[in-house]
Structures are given as C-alpha cells and as structure tokens.
Image (cartoon, rainbow, N blue to C red):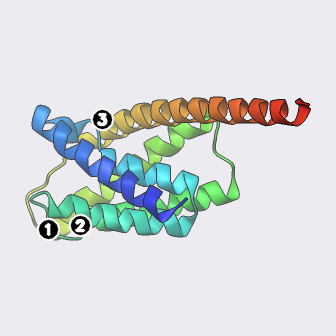
Amino acid sequence: MSFLGVVSGLVIGLVAQVLLGRLWSHVHQYLNPLTLVVIILALRGSPTAGMLSGSIAGFMQDAFSAQVLGVSSVGKTLVGYAVGAVNARFIVRSTVFLVPLIFFASAVEVAISILLDRILEISPVLYPRSILTVSAGNALAGTVFIKITERFKNRRNSAASIARLGERTSI
C-alpha cells in the first residue's frame, strides 16, 4: 500500500469520525471509523503498516477529542500490528474469518482503552458494555466496506484484463 493511500485512508477515517460524531453524539458507542481504517490498512499491508497506521490514527483521534494524548494510540497500535501479523500468516478474505477478526480486534482495542482510562484515572469515554456494541458495529461496517471495495476492485481488474485481451487480438 502506498504512502498516499495510507494517509488518505487515515484522513477519511478521521473526517468520518468527526462528521458522524457531529451528526450523532453517541456514535462512538457503536462505531469507531479510525479503528476500522487501521484494521483495513493492516489487512492490505504488513504488520508494520498496521502498527504505524494505528499509532498515527490513535494520536489523530486523541488530538481531536478530550482524551489524554496517546491513550487511543496504544490500543490501535497493538491491534494494527496483530491484524497485520494474522494477515501475513493467513490470507483473510472470507467473510467467515473477516467478521470475527474485526470483532475481536475492535473488542481488544476498546478493552485497552477502557483499561488505560482506569489506570490513568481519567473519565472514561467508553464503558465495559461498549465492548460488544462497538465491536459488533465495526465488524458489520468493516466487513461490508471490505466486500464492496473487493467487488469494485474485481470488476475493474476484469474489465482491464478484457481490454488487454481485446488489444492483443486486434489486427
């Protein structure tokens, strides 16, 4: 994945998080777009790309929220690396594996955030009951997004291969 792709993905995730937060104040209890972006970047790249995008996404999220700077970064960095490592070992494309992976990764990220809030004794943004709702929302939204983008990518690739085939056979 290119540097421009990573940066644009993170910016789109941040804009989505801010806009959804403005439209619906409780969206953070059901969906975390930046975590989804980190998971998607880790699935399309390497463990290092997932780790770096998680770190940057966490700092971006903390900078635009009332969180202590770095709290979101810890969870997103660990999740980005773990998802990238799983993807490097296994090819995760099937919905059967994609949904639990996104669900579990989101649950771990939310649990780390809640744990750090308690350790640092700061007012929590999320509560333990949010683990299931955020994880389910991320798993649903992430799987739908990945499947839609794969479908468009497959159509574009097949159209390009048909065009190349037509160029070869023309006289």
Which residue lies at the image location 52% right of the left edge and 45% below the top edge?
A: 101
Q: Earlier in the sequence, mark 3 or mark 1?
A: 1
Q: Residue at x 55, y 31 (%)?
A: 147
- Spatial CA distance of label 3 from label 1 is 23 Å
Looking at the rendered structure, the secondary structure element under dot 3 is: helix
Q: Residue at x 38, y 54 (%)?
A: 8
Task: Mark 3: give few (<14), some (14-19) or many (20+) Cα within 10 Å.
Answer: some
| Mark 2: amino acid | Val
Q: Name which of mark 3 and mark 2 comes first in the sequence.
A: 2
**Left-right relation of 33 to 29:** right
Q: Give the residue at mark 1.
A: 68
| SS class, disc 1 | loop
- Are discs 2 and 1 less than 8 Å apart at CB? yes
Residue that numbered label 2 is attached to:
71
**Mark 2 → mark 1, Cα distance in angstroms:** 6 Å
The amino acid on which the numbered mark 3 sits, given as a three-letter code, is Thr
Q: Would you say 164 lies left or right of 77 here?
A: right
Residue with the mark numbered 3: 133
Circle nearer the viewer, 3 or 1: 1
Number of marks present in the image shown? 3
| Other residues around mark 1 within 10 Å, as few (<14) / some (14–19) / many (≥20) | few
> Quadrant of residue 166 in the image?
top right
Question: Around disc 2, counting alpha carbons within 10 Å, would you say few (fewer than 14), some (14 to 19), or many (20 or more)?
Answer: many
Which residue is pictured at 46% across the width and 34% down the height? Answer: 145
